[in-house]
Image: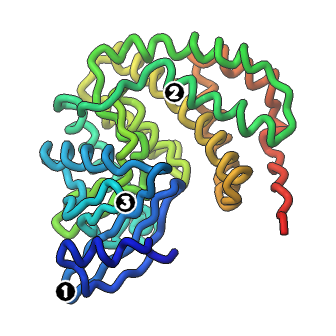
Amino acid sequence: MKPPATAADFLAMHGWGDGQISPVAGDASFRRYFRVQEGDRQAILMDAPPPHEDPKPFIAMAEYLANSGFAAPEIFARDLTQGLVLLEDFGEHRMREHLDQQPEDEESIYRQVIDLLRELHRIPAAPVPAYDWLQYLREVNLLTEWYCPAQQLDVDAEAFVACWKQVLAPVLAAQNNPVTVMRDYHAENIMLLADGRLGLLDFQDALVGHPAYDLVSMLQDARRDVSDELEEKMLAYYLADRNEEAAQEFRSHYAILGAQRNTKIIGIFTRLCVRDGKQRYLEFLPRMWRLLEKDLQHPALEPVAQWYARNIPAEVRSRSIPLPEKTE
């Protein structure tokens, strides 16, 4: 985790030449992050190296969110050619660790993150691409492209796509008035700021789509256990102002998008292990299968549930993925 060779000149050019650089935790992408400390001020240096990463979507979304009244990091400086961005440091008080240490705050903080989504869904959507058929199907296909080969499964990939087209149709039809979807809205991307607001991170892949997506991302968290009781309470809280018919339709779409997202994540976490050697992501797979199986119980997902039963039976889902052999 050494900073890029161009970091010193970039920081000096923008008034941070005497800053001390130290690494901070990254994510599952090629992006890297460093804390820059200079006297009593600090900032975060994002290294988003081209061609693997493009920081422009992050910058655009940060500006959209900030202009809409949400707490997104202020952009202090940028060098798009080098892929360097200097941005506001939200500190280290993250929702995930706070709740690990103070679980009594769980319901109040989850209400706050749901309130933020409700506000986001009331304003005009960001000027970003749509969450369309192609994107939804590209994502679920990560399971047949990565998980199934890793488990040496010969599956009916064509039927898999046909099932998803069938169950996703009502979700796409409901996106005629789309909202901003941040796509990675979960406890490890929410900072608890000193002023009581929620600091938002990791929104560079935002699209416009269905309001259930970020809700299910938060309540069916890939990295943190959320009890069924809390999930139901927060889902009911989000739907409190809808009539019974609208609420039931939303719950159906919520289950569909939960299954879509959890399917995608199983594929992504397998890819991170097999292709990138990041074996720690395998520890999340039992949680992902539990969440997916819960979603598949919804009647709206019967075609997909039947495909899973035929192609990936329960005894396979609990089987460890063989790790790639290490090369010298």
Q: Alpha-carbon neighbours of circle 2 within 10 Å: few (<14), some, or many (≥20)?
A: many
User: Upstream in the sequence, badge 2 or badge 3?
Assistant: 3
Counting from the top left corner in percent of width and height, residue 120 is at 23, 37
Q: Which of the pair 246/208 is nearer the observer?
A: 208
Left or right of 128: which side holds 291?
right
Q: Is residue 227 above or below residue 239?
A: below
Residue 233 showing in the rendered view: no
Question: Which residue in the protein does label 1 denote?
Answer: 40
Question: Which residue in the protein does label 2 denote?
Answer: 255
| Amino acid type of the residue tagged 1 in the rendering | Asp
Figure quadrant of residue 148:
top right
In the image, what residue occupies the spot 39% across and 46% down? 185
Q: Is residue 230 above or below residue 192?
A: above
Left or right of 46: which side holds 193?
left
Figure quadrant of residue 57:
top left
User: Upstream in the sequence, badge 1 or badge 3?
Assistant: 1
Figure quadrant of residue 197:
bottom left
Q: Which of the pair 151/3 is nearer the observer?
A: 3
Counting from the top left corner in percent of width and height, residue 118 is at 24, 36
User: Upstream in the sequence, badge 1 or badge 2?
Assistant: 1
> Which dot, 2 or 3, sits closer to the camera?
3
Q: Is residue 140 above or below residue 98?
A: above
Task: Give the CA separation, mark 1 to mark 2.
Answer: 47 Å
> Which dot, 1 or 3, sits closer to the camera?
3
Question: Which residue in the protein does label 3 denote?
Answer: 82
Task: Give the CA separation, mark 2 to mark 3.
Answer: 41 Å
In the image, what residue occupies the spot 22% across and 63% down? 77
In the image, what residue occupies the spot 50% across and 59% down? 27
Q: Is residue 268 above or below residue 8?
A: above
